[in-house]
Image (cartoon, rainbow, N blue to C red):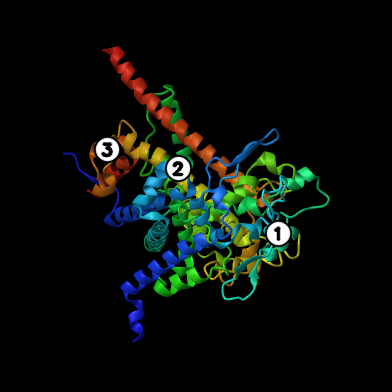
Amino acid sequence: MPATIYKPSTLIVLIFFLLTSLSVTAQQADAENCNLCHGLALLGIATPADGLRSFEITSDAYSHSTHRNVICRDCHTDINVFPHPEEVAKVQCYKSCHITKPFALTGYSHVEQADAHAISAHGFNPEYSEEKNAAKPDCKYCHSNTFRNVINNEALQESSKHCVRCHEGEGLAGVILHVSSHSGHRTAEASINVVELCSSCHADQGHMKQFDVNLTQVSGYERQFHGKALKRGLNEVANCMDCHRNHLNLPAEDPNSSIHPNNIQQTCSANSYCHSNVSSKFAASAIHSAPTTQNNPILFYVEWGFIILTAGTMALLFAHIFLDFGRWLGDIWMRRKEK
Amino acid sequence: MSQDYTRFTLSQRLQHIFMFVPFIILVLTGFPIKFPESEFWSFVMSAAGGIENARIIHRFAAAIMILDFAYHILYVGYNLIKKRPSLAEMHLLPNGRDGRNIKENLKYFLFMSDERPRFHKFSYIEKFDYWAVFWGMFIMAGSGIILWFPVLFSKFLPGIVIQIAYIAHSDEAMLALLAIIIWHFYNVHFNPRIWPANKVWYKGTLSEEEMEYEHPLELEEIKAREEASK
């Protein structure tokens, strides 16, 4: 009797099973017992260069993170001896680790994403100075691994808004699908957090000045319907990544870019919940930099036309109201004087 | 004995109501999106049931307002054909008298004269109100419908039209709201000679005293006509 699968009690048992299995694997991830020392609150070093540096791993935070199933040395590959060497290389996200991709038999690695990032606008540019390259976001800048931290309920609630724009009302089947795999998704992150993340650099004029990019992108997005509606909680609107992709962020001039004039039509209708069957003319309206006399003179003058029309009209109307009111006051004053 | 004079027919009063009720709803459901960070409009937005509900309510109210305006156009057209009024009988059309009235009113405001201008059926103030809404309806409904169906309209209109519609809808809404709550409300509510309200919008009639004060020229004409028909 297949219908019994959907009984609520079955769901509760399933959720209980999932939760308990998660906490078990979380403990198993520290198979090499690193937290024997790194779980100590005061573990750290003091160097003249860095000052105090804590080496404490809060096991709670770690066991609830995305990487809770990855053993420490899968990422910290340099650490092979004890005591550990003083200088260790930084973690590289494209290293292969022992976790398998859902439904696949291969070891997992972020190399695909790292490759896309490397050739994107955010990747290393040999023509740039070391300082300028360092000012670009690396893997860890965006993937701070705190967003999907399940103990952070507020962030999780925001994230779930993003999920339901497709998965609303899918019930048990949707839950199973979600738990078993979200590898096909750009992100489980809430749109508002994506915009906030991108804005942390792109809205920072001082930071962006060193790069040859448009400084009005974020303010332009916030002026448009997508940006305004998102702030009001409409989660189905496009965030930065929906159009600019997540790792392969390329400038519009690049023919491989999702926002190249040849591809933008496809980008607007890429998701079933976005715009379907759009024309190239529709796609051409998607720009969101502040209009200037150079980049968009028509829009620039329309905007100023309305500002002048509104200010001019209201100035005249206000003048009329004040004069009318003044005459009324004057009449009262004169009547009093006559008495 | 003082008598009441019909100013607005029942149809005209209903047209005004079916214009301003949707107007209020449209403002309450539209401005929270224009000002997404404002606390005040956040309150209004949550009262409307969040942005998802507000968008549906906004379109429903817009449909009623557009139908009301369409009815008004048909109403005006029908009356023009049926009554065939002369230019002088089309009281809402701006004419030379408005220019003279503005000059007279300015002199009165500045105490250069104690004579208020003698208005006919519609003063230049009322004509401005009417034509401002007339122009505003085309801008707001036109841009609103484009933003309602942007994919459809961009099949035959250039993409910049959507951007223009977006700016026009947002900015003209601001102008309309300011004109209504400052200008129109002053003239029909806050003006100390009118306060608390001009009741003609639901009563439809003006008393002889009100006619004498606001529309003396029209009253004069009505009386002359009554004399002649006696």
Q: Is residue B61 left or right of residue B3?
A: right
Classify mark 2: residues with Cα within 10 Å, few (<14), some (14-19) or many (20+). Answer: few
If you read the primary sequence from the N terminus, does the residue marked by circle 2 or circle 3 appear first? 2
Give the number of the mark in front: 2 or 3: 2
Residue A250 image point, x, y percent: 72, 59
Height in image: A95 above or below A311? below
Front in this rendered view, residue B174 or A52: A52
Which residue is depicted at the point 33% across and 17% down?
Answer: A333
Front in this rendered view, residue A272 or A70: A70
Which residue is depicted at the point 44% across and 23% down?
Answer: B110
Q: Which residue is mark 1?
A: A117
Contact, mark 2 vs mark 1 (Cβ under 8 Å): no
Q: Residue reaching furthest bottom?
A: A1
Q: In the image, what residue type sits under mark 3?
A: Glu
Residue A246 picture quarter: bottom right
Q: Which residue is mark 2?
A: B38
Residue B70 image point, x, y percent: 41, 62
- Label annotation for residue B192: none
Front in this rendered view, residue B133 or A42: A42
Chain at tag 3: B
CA gap between label 3 and label 1 equals 76 Å
Height in image: B158 above or below B203? below
Secondary structure, mark 2, is: loop
